[in-house]
Image (cartoon, rainbow, N blue to C red):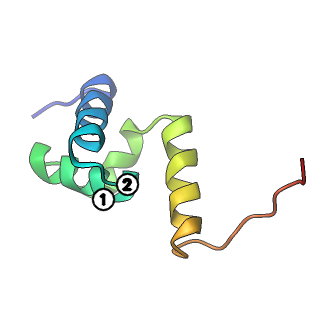
Amino acid sequence: MLVTQKQFLERLDRHIAKHKNGYIESILAVCEEMGIDPEQAAKYLSKPIIEKIRAEGESINLLPTTAKLPI
């Protein structure tokens, strides 16, 4: 099944809105629904989604916290 970035991101947005899951869990669920290997999902993600995944990973201690400038 050929999937475009637009199709993947639309399905991801619907899944997040419907199930109230985080991005990491929703991406894995959408990959399973669409028959996509999670390693291949990276090519469908936009820069803002990647930043949200990074922030989510840092908040649940999956990724090391990056330094942030005080505002």
Q: Is residue 6 left or right of residue 60?
A: left
For residue 2, which quarter of the picture? top left
Q: Judge the density around disc 1: few (<14), some (14-19), many (≥20) Cα neighbours within 10 Å.
A: few
Relative depth, front residue between 12 and 18 = 18
Relative depth, front residue between 32 and 21 = 21
Q: What residue is disc 1 on?
A: 25
Residue type, numbered disc 2:
Gly
Residue at the image point whose x is 57% and y is 67% from the top: 59
Which residue sits furthest right? 70
Q: Are marks 2 and 1 in contact (CB under 8 Å)?
A: yes
Residue at the image point whose x is 51% and y is 59% from the top: 56
Residue at the image point whose x is 69% and y is 69% from the top: 65
| Image: 52 above or below 3 | below
Q: Judge the density around disc 2: few (<14), some (14-19), many (≥20) Cα neighbours within 10 Å.
A: some
User: Residue 52 location, x and y as percent?
Assistant: 53, 47
User: Residue 25 location, x and y as percent?
Assistant: 30, 59
Q: Where's the N terminus, which quadrant?
A: top left
Residue type, numbered disc 1:
Glu
Q: In this figure, what is the number of numbered marks?
A: 2
Task: Find residue 9 and name its label.
Answer: none
Q: Is residue 10 left or right of residue 62?
A: left
User: Residue 60 location, x and y as percent?
Assistant: 51, 72
| Image: 50 above or below 57 | above
Residue at the image point whose x is 22% and y is 33% from the top: 11
Q: What residue is disc 2 on?
A: 22
Q: CA distance from mark 2 to mark 1?
A: 6 Å
Mark 1 residue element? helix
Q: Is residue 52 left or right of residue 66?
A: left
